[in-house]
Every structure is written in C-alpha cells, then in structure tokens.
Image (cartoon, grey):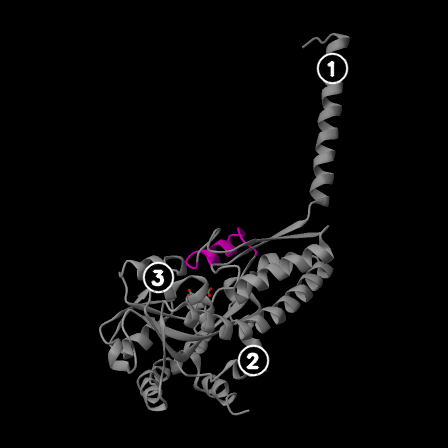
Amino acid sequence: MRRTPSALALAALTLAATTASMLTTSIANAADPIVIKFSHVVAENTPKGLMANKFKALIAERMGDKVLVEVYPNSQLFGDDNVLEAMQLGDVQLAAPALSKFSRYTDLIALYDLPFLFEDLDAVDRFQQSEQGQAMLDAMKKKGLIGLGYLHNGMKQLSSSQPLRVPEDARGLKFRIMASPVLEAQFKALDAAPLKKPFSEVFTLLQTRAIDGQENTWSNIYSKKFHEVQPYITETNHGLLDYMVVSSNEFWNGLPDDVRADVKAALDESLAYGNQIARDKADEDRQAIIDSKRSEVIELTPEQRAQWVQIMKPVWKQFEKEIGAELIEAAYATNQQ
Ligand code: LMR
C-alpha cells in the first residue's frame, strides 16, 4: 500500500502513543499494591471480625504503598461452603474458617471438634503452641493450603427451642451443625438430627423453626441475634470453636520474602489482639444475652453436665483411627498442665 507522507506521520504518532500508553500501564501495574482479600462469615464485632479489621489497619499503616487488605465480613464475598475452593482458584487470599470446616482437606484437624476435649482456652493455647499443634498448620499443604496461625472464638453452647438440661432433652431435635463428621457423630450420639448448613443460613432456619437448635459461641449467638429466636441456651461449654487463618501455598509463597515477613508479623500481632478479644467477648456477650431477656441461659448442675460428657465422649473412639490416639492424648493432657 502506498502511503502519503502525512499518513506515515500519523502511523508513527499512533505507534508512539500506543507505546507510551503501554509503558504507563506497566509502570502503574508495577506500582499497584498487592491485594489481599480476606473473606469471613461472621459479624465485624466478633473476635474474627475485629482481628481482620486490625490486620487491615496494621497493613495500611505499615505497608500501605505495597499491600492493600480488603476485608469482606458476613459471607459477603464467600460462604463457608465455597471459600476454600475460591482460595485454591486465587479468588481470595486469606480466610479463617472454623476448624470444623476443614474436614474435606484433612482428617487431623477434626481433633478440635471432639466434645469435652479442652476444658478452657488456656488448655487450647497450650496445645496449639506445642510442636504437635504447630505441625497441624501444615496439615493441608498438599491440598494447596497453608495455615498461618490459630484464632480463638470460644467454647460452644447449645441453643434450642426447648430447654435442654439432660441429653434426653435433645432427642429427636434438629440441630444445625458445621460441616464436620465429628459434630455429626456428636449429635447422633444424642439421638438428635444434625443438619450441615452454612453459617449464613442459621438465623433464618431458627426463625422459621425449620430447625430446633444449634451449637455456637456466646459471641456468634449474640452478634447474629440467634438468642432472639432461640428461647433457651444451655451453658454446656461442650466443644471448641476456633479458627485457622489460611492462605494458598501459591499466593503465600509467591510473595516477595520481605513482604511475606512483614505481612506475617502484622498477622501475628492481629491474632494476639483477636485472641484477647475472644476471651473478653465470651463474658460480655453472655451477659448481654442474659440482659436482653430474650433467651434463658440454663446453667447445668455438675450431675447434669456429667451426663452430657458420658453420652458425647464416646465419639472420641469413633475418630481415634483418623486423628491418632497419641494426638488426642496429647491434646487432652494440656488440661492438666
Ligand atoms: C459457624 O459456622 O457456626 C461458625 O464457624 C461461624 C464462624 O466463623 O465463627
């Protein structure tokens, strides 16, 4: 094709403009911060919600030019049922699911669901900080997930449409559970009907009486207003609801070394903060529920509690092979240390 001088000049100009724009784009990309999307399912005024916001604030303050944390609470971005798949696909970089929600990825973490295993959060801390507890953070590495730390919520209570004082009171009732085979076995031991449902559906299921009850911490019950649709909460402290903060191997190991170290330091600091909040909130939210007068908090006598232990504890045996008797023993021993 024959070009006139002016057409040539125009082509050269267009080429120059395109090159300049490509350069600008690549410079902008290089300067763009690394985005960490942190997805969770609870309200912001909870140990996990506050921990996530603290992490966001620390990163903004210390590394705002390099890293941007976006927090998505209340199942806004992903729910329990799809967040880990989304993480493997690179659609979310951080999450802190309850330990009960990893059963599709490892048998080991089911340890934490065994009823009446830990007496209190001090025992949980001792176990999590032990060599065995720390090794469990790597239990899902082969599945592409890396554990970065533990976070407490607290001990679980049983809420219900009927007063639960002894195990027979739960017989035949429908309870929502997290997706965990141990929790399923625990409610089956009571002759109750466990239903695995995402956290985001629990309030409506309770409100419409599609289910009779659920197990959760004081903080989750209060922040999601379960106590407004459940007239009774039995203070059983029968199990633990804790979290593991996870990322994908690909994202985490792909971070520049210095960035990874600084992000980890901010995360550790936020976890310490969240763990302290968990301890304070359990008492505060329990009291707020009592003060609301929407739900009666039932305290068990030692004899009544012993009956729940007697019915639920045999569940340990069912999972001894998958989890390992030694690990169960080591965890239980932390109550005496
Ligand atoms: C639940 O599903 O009940 C909890 O795991 C929610 C949470 O993240 O605390």
Rendering coords of residue 76 (x, y %):
47, 51
The first of marks 2 and 1 along the sequence is 1
Query: Label 1, on which residue?
Result: 10
Quadrant location, ligand no. 1: bottom left
Label 1 and label 3: CA atoms lie apart by 63 Å
Q: Is residue 333 above or below residue 105?
A: below
Rendering coords of residue 318 (x, y %):
34, 81
Give, as a three-letter code, the residue at label 3.
Lys
Between residue 170 and residue 280, name the one nearer to us.
280
Side of 26 relative to 104 (left or right)? right
Q: Is residue 271 above or below residue 71?
A: below
Query: Label 2, on which residue?
Result: 125
Label 3 and label 2: CA atoms lie apart by 28 Å
Between residue 148 and residue 285, name the one nearer to us.
285
Magenta part of the chain: 80-93
| Residue at x-position 47% and y-position 87% | 332
Q: Which mark is residue 197?
A: 3
Q: Are marks 1 and 3 in contact (CB under 8 Å)?
A: no
In this rendering, does residue 141 appear at all?
no
Give, as a three-letter code, the residue at label 1.
Leu
